[in-house]
Amino acid sequence: MLVARPSHCTASRSVDCAATTGYTTPSADFVSLIDAPPTPSLSLDPTERWLLLLDNPPLPNLAQLCLPELRLAGLRFDPQRRLPARASGYMGMTLRPLFDQLGRPLAVGSAPEIQVEGLLPGSKVRSVTWRPDGGAFAFVVLPPELNAEPQLWFASLNFEMDCPLPRTLMAERLVDSGGNPLKLNGIRQAPLQWHPDCQRLLLTCVPWPPPPQPECMTGLRVPAAPSVQDAEPGVKAPSRTYADMLKTPDDEDEYEWHTTTQLLLYDLESRSARPLDDPAKNRVAVISPDGKFMMVAKTERPFSYAVGDVRFARKIEVLEVDGSGHWEVACLPLRDKIPTFMMPVRTFLARSHGEQTSRIRSASGKHLMGAILARLQTCGTSFSP
């Protein structure tokens, strides 16, 4: 822990100014209190046989607080690492079995601990996601260098049941079939989730090839036109004041460039990744329980200068994971005229539930993702980040 000293000297103290500027370390008792290791977080595998202990990080240092941060449409994120602003991670992972080889519960003190290794010293871990069968987990690694891009890693629990458990578990980094790193984009949500077949991962990545950067990001920001906001004459609407809103067309272009992503299906066996859809401003992607379909929410133009990203217009679509089926479920308009009291929600949809559901059923021959109607009946509330 560091404490700042004042950068000026008073007449009553004969102290050398050069020696008192900067940061100093307080007493050892105070440092031990502030830097005491926090309680680890816990992650239980789906079969409830393994417990993963995640070492929470201490307080951030000054270098972490000084990382670049963009504030657009109510989002605050690190443009270099494509993560939420000041995103951190766990310092280490320890695997612990909950039952012995005969299926008897293990006491806390008698359970062996397996250290997850293979990472560079100083790396941090985030977005830990268990495989549906509990036999492996994938996670994102933040390298020690603060400006390094996040990496996708994987660890498999391929232990022999008749042999003693090892003391370490080696994790491996995942790359594509050409050995190139996977450029993840975690600005909105965790950039990975497991497919129900336990052999593939759904990844949210930077489009490839990457779209060209807007001119406002590559040089001097010279506005091409004035910033104009139009109000509908004679129309009153409740409004709040939000921070970090879009202000200019340049902000719109920069926001769109950073939030445009590509959904990839990554095969762990072949180390190959294939796109599931064209690049878009994807908000949330959810795979159906049978693994055949995927529901995606996408942000749509026009944007607003009065409300943030969470209230922008969006389109909800259903895609076939291993086919070419593509259906539009709903188009939800911009939410800029919602009352400001009593937990208001949108009270209409742009398209009828019954009409869209009948179209999907007739096209696919079966009911797609039983949660669609339940989610849409709340007007997209539970499906929004």
Image (cartoon, grey):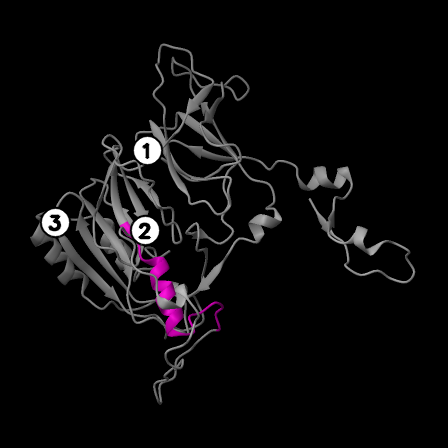
Residue shown at 30% from the left, 33% from the top: 132
**Quadrant of res 12:** bottom right
The residue segment tinted magenta is: 241-262
Label 3 sits on what residue type?
Answer: Ser
- Mark 3 lies on residue: 324
- Residue 131 numbered tag: 1
Q: Position of residue 320 (x, y in %)?
A: 16, 47
Element under label 1?
loop
Residue farthest to the bottom, as pictured = 234
Q: Looking at numbered disc 1 in the image, what kind of residue is underneath it?
A: Arg
User: Height in image: 282 above or below 162?
Assistant: below
Where does residue 208 sit, x and y in percent of width and height? 27, 50
Binning the other alpha carbons within 10 Å of mark 1 as few (below 14), some (14 to 19) or many (20 upward) gives many
- Name which of mark 1 and mark 2 comes first in the sequence: 1
Q: Which of marks 1 and 3 is nearer the N terminus?
A: 1
Q: Of tags 2 and 3, which is closer to the observer? A: 2
Mark 1 and mark 3: Cα distance apart in space: 26 Å
